C-alpha cells in the first residue's frame, strides 16, 4: 500500500479491507501524523452522515450477493456468470461481509453433514444383518 486515500480510510473504518491492508493502514496511522489527520477528517465525514452514492453502496452492501446466492456458490449450483461474479467479489474485492457469510455457510454445511453420515452408517450396519439373514449367508 503506497498512500492512504479517503476511500481506503473509509473502508478501513468499516472493516472492509483485506487483513493485510488493514494491518498496513494501522501501521501508517501509527507512524504518520498527516495520515492520522486525514483519518480524523474521514471519521468526521462519517459522523456527519455521508450520503454519497458510493457511501450508500458500501454501507448497504449493494454489490454483495445474497446469502442464498452464496449458498448456491458453495454448492456450485448457479449459472457460470453468477459463479464468476461471486468468485471475483470474494477473492478480488475481498469483501469481509460476504466472506464471513460464506464461512458461516461452510460451517453449517459441515455440521449438517455429520448427523447424515452417522445415520447412514447406522442404516447400513442394521441392514447388513438383515440382508445376510435373507440371503442365507450366515
Image (cartoon, grey):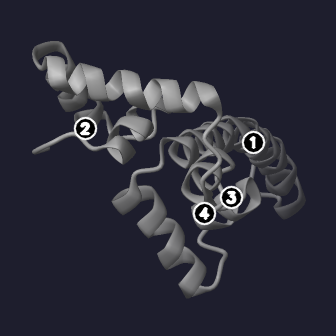
State the CA–CA distance, disc 1 to disc 3.
32 Å
Query: Along the polypeptide, which appears first: circle 1 or circle 2?
Result: 2
Q: Nearer the viewer, residue 48 or 29?
A: 48
Residue 112 location, quadrant: top right
Is 118 drawn above or below residue 87 in the view shown?
above
Which of the labelled discs sits on residue 63, or is there none? 4
Q: Are marks 4 and 1 in contact (CB under 8 Å)?
A: no
Secondary structure under the numbered disc 4 in the rendered image:
loop
Q: Which residue is the site of mark 1? A: 125
Residue beneath disc 2: 21
Cα distance, mark 2 to mark 3?
27 Å
Front tag of 3 and 4: 4
Q: Position of residue 27 (x, y in %)?
A: 16, 21
- Along the polypeptide, which appears first: circle 2 or circle 3? 2
Q: Tell which circle, 2 or 4, labels the residue nearer the N-terminal end.
A: 2
Towards the viewer: 52 or 100: 52
Q: Secondary structure at mark 3?
A: helix
Q: Is residue 13 above or below residue 55?
A: above
Mark carried by residue 71: 3
Q: Residue at x 35, y 42 (%)?
A: 6
Q: Tell me how far mark 2 sits from mark 4, CA to CA.
A: 21 Å
Q: Position of residue 35 (x, y in %)?
A: 21, 26
- Other-residue count near label 3 (Cα within 10 Å), few / some / many at <14 / 14–19 / ≥20: some
Amino acid at each position: 500500500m503506497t498512500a492512504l486515500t479517503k476511500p481506503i480510510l473509509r473502508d478501513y473504518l468499516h472493516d472492509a479491507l483485506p487483513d493485510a491492508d488493514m494491518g498496513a493502514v494501522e501501521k501508517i496511522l501509527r507512524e504518520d501524523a498527516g495520515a492520522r489527520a486525514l483519518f480524523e477528517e474521514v471519521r468526521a465525514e462519517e459522523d456527519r452522515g455521508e450520503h454519497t452514492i458510493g457511501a450508500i453502496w458500501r454501507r448497504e452492501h449493494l454489490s454483495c450477493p445474497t446469502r442464498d446466492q452464496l449458498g448456491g456458490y458453495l454448492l456450485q449450483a448457479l449459472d457460470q456468470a453468477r459463479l464468476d461474479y461471486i468468485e471475483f467479489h470474494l477473492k478480488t474485492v475481498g469483501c469481509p461481509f460476504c466472506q464471513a457469510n460464506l464461512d458461516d455457510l461452510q460451517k453449517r454445511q459441515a455440521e449438517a453433514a455429520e448427523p447424515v453420515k452417522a445415520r447412514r452408517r447406522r442404516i447400513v450396519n442394521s441392514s447388513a444383518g438383515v440382508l445376510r439373514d435373507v440371503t442365507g449367508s450366515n
